[in-house]
Amino acid sequence: MLLDPRSLMNRSFVPVEHAYSAKDSMLYALGCGLGADPIAPGQLRYIYEGAPDGLQVLPTQANVLGYTGFWADQPDTGITWRKLLHAEQSIMLYRPLAAEGRVIGETRVVGLHDKGIDKGALMLQERRVVDAASGALIATVTQTTMLRADGGFGRIHGATHGVPLAAPHAIPDRAPDHVCDLPTLCQAALLYRLNGDLNPLHADPIVAQAAGFSRPILHGLATMGMALHAVLKIVLGYDATAVRGMRVRFTAPMLPGETLRTELWQDGSVVSLRGMALERGAVVLNAGRVDLG
């Protein structure tokens, strides 16, 4: 089935009501590598309900709240889902995330950009995460997906639909101010998927091989959470209350068991970052930034 951009832009998503607990928040933090040092007080505040100042929440947990689930494999989408890749993710926070609560996720497709029949297409989704009781906006999550096998619709429908693509964040042209190495578990993808992203690319070797990978890869969002962990450790003393937003580009897959090296540049309220799978020397995150306030 050929991808129909008008159908995707008009696709209806049922709002997702999501009640989550402190246990869910701790599971999310564990999936992003917190707790690797079980005696570090800064890490414990995200994974232990008995932490002296109470349980804090990683701001990137907004990525999994009110998530509609993996839907690109539904037959009516026209998406060659085994060939898609997560290209970019951004979050904007309007209030701190509570350790437990009830939220509603409202998802829509807001942009489609044809790169050409041999280059694929980019799809932008936006999710508003609101408090279920008050309706107050908590966060906006924007996801950009590369549809590697679904380009070429622009010849018929026009190349661009919806909101334009944002220019990438420019990494400073100097040596990084800080470097942080964080290991991943061999079972990291199997752990992170329990937050709700059940794409079999991250668990099933047959699906991974069909997509061109030697084995299941780590979720890009897990790598994003790990990069924020590096910012918390090096820049913020493990206090996430100053984080207002984050944006990253996924440039290559990370494999569970590898070490994420995050290079950091701090310029006022903006922390720029780039992430590398240390063992292979592959840049897996680029054009990253964390906004502080």
Image (cartoon, grey):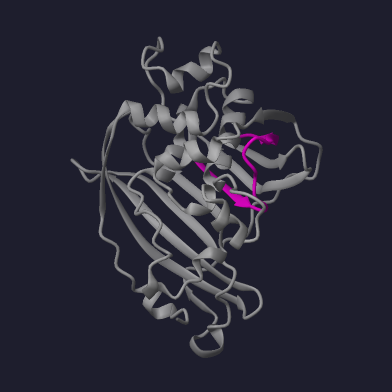
The residue segment tinted magenta is 245-269
Report if residue 269 is visible in the image. no
- Identify the residue at horizontal 59%, vertical 48% (top origin): 216
Judging depth in this view, the residue of 207 and 6 nearest the camera is 207
**Secondary structure of the magenta portion, mostly?**
strand
Left or right of 65, for residue 104: left
Query: Residue extending furthest left?
Result: 133
Relative height, residue 233 to residue 194 (above, below):
above
174 sits left or right of 137 in the view: right
Q: Position of residue 208 (x, y in %)?
A: 58, 55
What is the residue that sits farthest to the front in this orientation? 206
**Is 85 colored magenta in this rendering?**
no
Q: Residue at x 52, y 12 (%)?
A: 41
Comparing 203 with 42, the one in front is: 203
Q: Can you name the residue that lies furthest to the bottom here?
A: 156
Quadrant in which residue 276 is drawn: top right
Compared with 36, 107 (above or below) is below
Q: Is residue 47 left or right of residue 223?
A: left
